Image: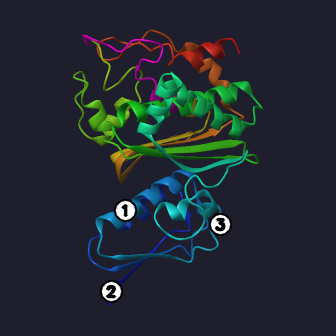
Amino acid sequence: MLEEKIIYAPNKLIFEDTIKFVNSFCRIWGKKKYIFDFKNTTTLDTFSLLYVSYKLEVFKKNNPTSEFHARNIKHLTYPAHMGFFKSFGANFGKNPGEAAGSRTYSPIKIFKISEIKQTARDSGIHYAEYLEQLAEEISNILTQNKSETVTDILKYSIREILRNIVEHSEGDEFSFCAQYIPSLGKVYFAVLDKGIGLKKALSSNPKLSLLDDMDAIRWGLKPGVSGKVYPGQKRKPKGDWANSGYGLYMTSNICKQGSSTFFICSGESGLLISKTGEQELKLEMEGTAVYLGIDIHKIKELKVMLKKFGDNVPKDIFIQPSKSSMNIASKSKNA
């Protein structure tokens, strides 16, 4: 009989508590019967739905001779409906992507990058156009077209994050989920990929000398920084959809200027940006995860910031934005 190891989930699986919970078990090794007990858990945010389920899946793979059980989970009907438990093999709730979704949420969905590219090729379009269609569908669901400005900014943010994954992660798939809480007037969405991580993705840029994962995150949030396009490059990608390293910069500023929340983690580091400031967190993330919490009541204030977004970027390290990267700014100028 295997020795039992009980791991209790906290009351709230949100950011710091979520990361502490994952850190408490992710480096455990040994043949045991692992029991994850959720009896005290009442809340999971959108980021935690993806991050915890992914890390539990990784933990199981790292301990192939052990047993795994999730108990005291019947009260967590919403995470179950979103596909949380079946994401890591517990037999409760729906599979990822099984729930139809509604005007207030998009359940956990898993996308294959190769299938996205093939679908785009079959349709005769650039894969970024396919991602824009997907982002528009998601943003329309979450905002119900109540505000063109809000819908456009959500679409832009989701599209640029997904583009970063497809263009830079070198992974096979990514997962996504989103939620709109009308009473709070807030939209939350999270994306997680299983790729090479931000530091390795940016390391191909010879203009950058990255110290660690946090250094890579901070560089990744600067305007015009990319691992594939940089000043002095002999053959730069061309066209409206050319990558120019503005996706994360724009989306993080959307949150900062709109009194909302932005979180990104990769490798051993995570950075949380909110109206109260910045907070660095230590964790383990094999790929990259991004979480946005946007206050739709404050988002119209972003037009001022977007109008200031121009071409006055230093050219020794940074590059200028592509047409697609500036698309949301040009719309907002006329809004």
On screen, 89 above or below 245? Answer: below
| Secondary structure state at the residue bearing disc 2 | loop
| Residue in view at x 29 percent, y 13 percent | 231
Kind of residue indicated by mark 3: Thr
| Residue in view at x 33 percent, y 64 percent | 61
| Mark earlier in primary sequence (2, 1) | 2
Q: Where is residue 166 in the image (x, y as percent from the top left)?
A: 41, 33
Kind of residue indicated by mark 1: Asn
Label 2 CA crowd tier, 10 Å (few <14, some 14–19, many 20+) = few
Alpha-carbon span between mark 3 and mark 1: 25 Å
Is 61 positioned to the left or the right of 174 in the image? Answer: left
Q: Position of residue 88 (x, y in %)?
A: 46, 63
- Eye-nearest disc, 2 or 1: 2
Question: Where is residue 156, by image quadrant?
Answer: top right
- Eye-nearest disc, 3 or 1: 3
Alpha-carbon span between mark 2 and mark 1: 21 Å
Could one spot residue 26 in this view of the protein?
no
Alpha-carbon span between mark 3 and mark 2: 30 Å
Q: Mark 1 points at which residue?
A: 23
Image quarter in which the C terminus is found: top right
Is 283 positioned to the left or the right of 136 in the image? Answer: left
| Secondary structure state at the residue bearing disc 1 | helix
Q: Mark 2 points at which residue?
A: 3
Range covered by the magenta-colored residues: 232-253
Image quarter in which the N terminus is found: bottom left
